[in-house]
Image: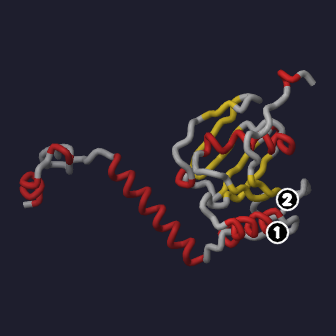
């Protein structure tokens, strides 16, 4: 192979453990412990290593709140990779999609995790017969998950209320934008 055609290897070896290549078992195919929370900076090294298993990764799905804002696409030298962030993506996971519907789902270990805890979690997630749910792999109890989900929903509602313009009620005068109102206007509107 000509040197110009070789895929660039990782500049920093990713901390990654994968289940053996076999029929899928469990919720994840392995675990990844990134060095930072900048997905655009962390992915090129991970994708270089995973290209052996998946081929060219075409798309990465991630949970928006798990990462700093990421670009919509990155170019890893082997072609563009689309990055799709969703709040409905399971917490602390990423999904990588390659050609022909090939896919890997990885548990993402917290950046600041203790090294021994991170290693144990990664080894458990990569065990060939592991079928443990993501929450259990991360040590999240079911009642804590419910609380976290409720907090996430409340945060999303709060953000959507802030971003939506205020509407006037029928048969009343139009409401001005909150930044145009002063305390006296708010009190008069309520009287």
Above/below status of 54 relative to 5: below
- The residue carrying pointer 1 sits among few (fewer than 14), some (14 to 19) or many (20 or more) residues within 10 Å by Cα, namely some
Secondary structure of the residue carrying tag 2 is loop
Q: Residue at x 11, y 50 (%)?
A: 182
Image quadrant assignment for residue 31: bottom right
Q: Residue at x 67, y 57 (%)?
A: 108
x then y, percent, for residue 115: 69, 65
Q: Are marks 2 and 1 in contact (CB under 8 Å)?
A: yes
Quadrant containing the N terminus in the rendered view: top right
Tell me how many marks there are.
Answer: 2
**Residue 171 x, y percent position in the rendering:** 14, 48
Between residue 136 and residue 121, name the one nearer to us: 121
Residue with the mark numbered 2: 19
Horizontal and vertical percent for residue 37? 58, 50
Q: Is residue 150 left or right of residue 191?
A: right
Question: For the C terminus, which image quadrant?
Answer: bottom left
Residue name at image x 61 percent, y 45 percent:
39
Q: Disc 2 or 1, which lies upstream in sequence? A: 2
Image quadrant of residue 190? bottom left
In-image side of 64 versus 50 (left or right): left
41 sits to left or right of 55:
left
Residue behind mark 1: 130
- Badge 2 density bin: few <14, some 14–19, many ≥20, Cα 10 Å: many
Residue appearing at x 84%, y 63% in the figure: 25
Closest to the observer, 59 or 169: 59
- Depth order, front residue of 190/149: 149
Residue 142 location, x and y as percent? 60, 76
Per the model, the C-alpha gap separating discs 2 and 1 is 9 Å
Residue 110: quarter of image: bottom right
**Relative to 21, residue 146 above or below:** below
């Amino acid at each position: 192979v000509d040197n110009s055609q070789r895929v660039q290897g990782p500049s920093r070896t990713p901390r990654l453990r994968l289940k053996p290549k076999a029929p899928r078992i469990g919720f994840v195919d392995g675990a990844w412990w990134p060095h930072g929370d900048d997905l655009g900076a962390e992915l090129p090294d991970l994708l270089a290593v995973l290209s052996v298993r998946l081929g060219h990764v075409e798309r990465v799905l991630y949970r928006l709140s798990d990462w700093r804002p990421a670009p919509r696409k990155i170019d890893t030298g082997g072609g563009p990779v689309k990055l799709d962030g969703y709040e409905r993506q399971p917490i602390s996971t990423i999904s990588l999609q390659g050609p022909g519907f090939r896919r890997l789902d990885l548990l993402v270990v917290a950046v600041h995790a203790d090294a021994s805890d991170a290693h144990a979690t990664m080894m458990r997630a990569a065990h060939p017969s592991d079928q443990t749910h993501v929450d259990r792999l991360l040590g999240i109890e079911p009642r804590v998950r419910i609380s976290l989900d409720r907090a996430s929903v409340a945060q999303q509602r709060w953000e959507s209320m802030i971003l939506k313009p205020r509407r006037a009620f029928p048969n009343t005068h139009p409401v001005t934008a909150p930044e145009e109102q002063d305390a006296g206007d708010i009190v008069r509107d309520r009287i």
